[in-house]
Each structure stands twice: as C-alpha cells, then as structure tokens.
Amino acid sequence: MLHHLKEKIIKIINKKLLRTPGVETLRKNFNSEKNKKSHVNFWLKKSSKNPGINKFFFEKNTANEKFSQNISDYTFDAINNFSITEEMLDTLKKFGLLVIKNALPKEEKENIISHFLELKNKELSNNWMGEITRITREESELQRGYIDISQFEYLNRYSNQATKNIYNKVVKPNVELHYLKLKKILEEKPLRGETLLHSDRFLPHFKMFYTPFKIEKNDAPFQYALGSHKIDENYINFFLKSKYFDETDENSFKLIKKTVTVTTDENTLYIAFTNGLHKRSAFTKSNSERFMMFFQYVERFNKFNYLFN
C-alpha cells in the first residue's frame, strides 16, 4: 500500500510540477514578447547542452537536403531485426520522422491486438493501469486505456533505443492505447491540437506510435511537416509570435516545407519529433475506426532533466 501511495505522489509531482513545459505555458503565462523570449531562450539553451538533443534538433541540415512527399522515402523494414539502425536514426535526425514496417514479431503483435479488442469492447483484463477514459464528441468517440510497456519486449526495446539516442538516457514512456471511432457524421470542422498542423511544445520532444492494423487515407492518418523540428531563428520566431501555435499562425509557413502523410501497412511503428508541426488527418469515411498506441515521455524526461544535463 505504501509503495502504491509513493508511486501516486511521484506521478502527481511529475505531471503537475516537473512536466516538460508545453505551448500552453507560453499562451497562459506571458503578457510580453520580451518575457516570453527570455523563457524560451532559457529552456532552449539548457536543452542544447544535452548531446543527443543537440544532434537531433540543433544541428542544421545540409542546404541540398531534399524533402519528398513519398512516405516510402522515410520507411524502413525491420527485417526480423526489430531494432533501430544508424541509417534510421539519420533519417529521423534530418526529417523528424521515421517509419518502421514489420516492426514486431507475430506473437507481440497479436498480444497488442488482444489489448485493443478489450479496449474496444470495454472489457479490460488485469493487464491495464486504471480505468478507460472516454471522450465523446459530435463526430467521434475516443476510448483511451493505459498499460505498462514492460509487458511488451520489442516495443520496450525500441523505446529504450530511441530515448538513449535522443535524450542521452533511457526513459520509460507513458503508454496509451486509443480506439477512435467515427460516427455517421464526417469530420468537417478542423480541431485545434488534432486536425490542424500544430506543435506540442517548443522544447525538443518526440512521440512513438504503433498500429497493428493498416491506416489508409480515409482512416485519419498522421501528417508531418518535414524538418519543422529543427531549432533555428524561424522556429524560435514561430513560438514567440504565435497565438495558436498551429498552421493558422502567420509564421507557420516558414516551418512547413513539405508535409507527408503516414499511411501504413499493418504492424507499423513510427517516431516523430512533435515539437515540429504535425496533425491527425480528418476522417473522410463514415463509421471509420482507428487503433493507435502512443508513447509519451514528457513526465519522466522533464524540467529536471533539462536543467541538469
């Protein structure tokens, strides 16, 4: 009982006090551009001292770097190796996006599918953490459940590799399974923070995603503005001058060179630097559904880690 109480207290501290600052911090807490600039520059300077972060986010691409809208140019096959290679990391560094097909062995993939079916049917086994969260809108319904990554050997390996290279230390993620179901009404109105290209936070940041099923163009695929994760003058000005921190802000066009849509085969994992501009596409087919795992690191790689690199 004391162990569970300790874990709960640590979780509250991580979530409320130490969590990596996001764009909502800039929106709520700063009335002047001068104060906002000091805040942004302070945290970016701290983050640049981490060698992994400096490599992936601060090192400039070469002038002749080509941005293609063909998702196959950012896609690799795991080929039963089930790990992240140096070539994959180089692609991620340049473009902010990496896609790995045939990512998991059959047994682990089937295990994940069984979890998604439990979530869809609202019948959770003992392998989950807490209750289902339900979010209902006019157009869609989302069911969200939480699991511990340690029960998935190969996903855990991918996560450890990614965090060790990007953050210069192994960081355990918070893992969410989302079952998103579109109702009969199609999504016609853009949603801020979802179906408009947006940034999650001004600090270097990434998410890992996994889907056991195909995601085609009608199934609300992920979209990414290639190279928008790179921290330079245009990047900083975007965060200083934006109101919504998305594609409706005037300075966003300087970050949006080309976008790519991540339509996937089954058993696909991808990593995206989500300080860069990204979104979920709108559903364009009635009664569609989407199954997606999200791996997030902002609670365990937090303000403390940026301050004491």
Image (tube, helix red, strand yellow):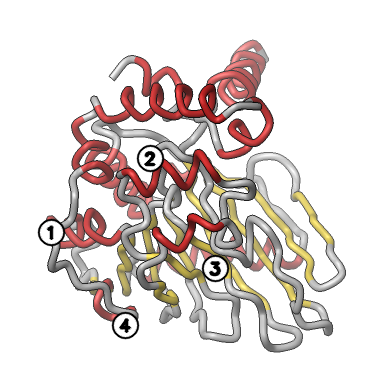
Q: At 23% across and 69% down in the image, what residue appears? A: 78
Residue designated by label 3: 113
Question: Which-is-in-front pick, marks 2 and 3?
Answer: 2
Secondary structure state at the residue bearing disc 4: loop
Looking at this view, is 191 or 19 the one in front?
Answer: 191
Task: Find residue 204 and name its label.
Answer: 2
**Structural distance between the alpha carbons of marks 2 and 4:** 25 Å
Q: Which mark is residue 177?
A: none
What is the CA distance from the residue labelled 3 to the residue labelled 1?
41 Å
Q: In the picture, residue 254 is in which quadrant?
A: bottom left
SS at badge 2: loop
Instruction: Determine which residue is flagged by label 4.
Output: 70
Q: Earlier in the sequence, mark 1 or mark 2?
A: 1
Q: Which residue lies furthest to the bottom in this view?
A: 285
The residue labelled by disc 1 is 62
CB of mark 1 within 8 Å of CB of mark 2?
A: no
Amino acid type at circle 1 is Thr
Say which label, 3 or 1, has the lower sequence index: 1
Residue visible at 41% across and 72% down?
Answer: 259
Mark 3: secondary structure: helix
Q: Which amino acid does label 4 sit on?
A: Asn
Q: How many labels does the image show?
A: 4
Please report the residue visible at 53 percent of the width from the left and 22 percent of the height from the top: 35
Instruction: Write the residue at 43% across / 74% down.
Output: 262
Q: Residue 304's image quarter?
A: top left
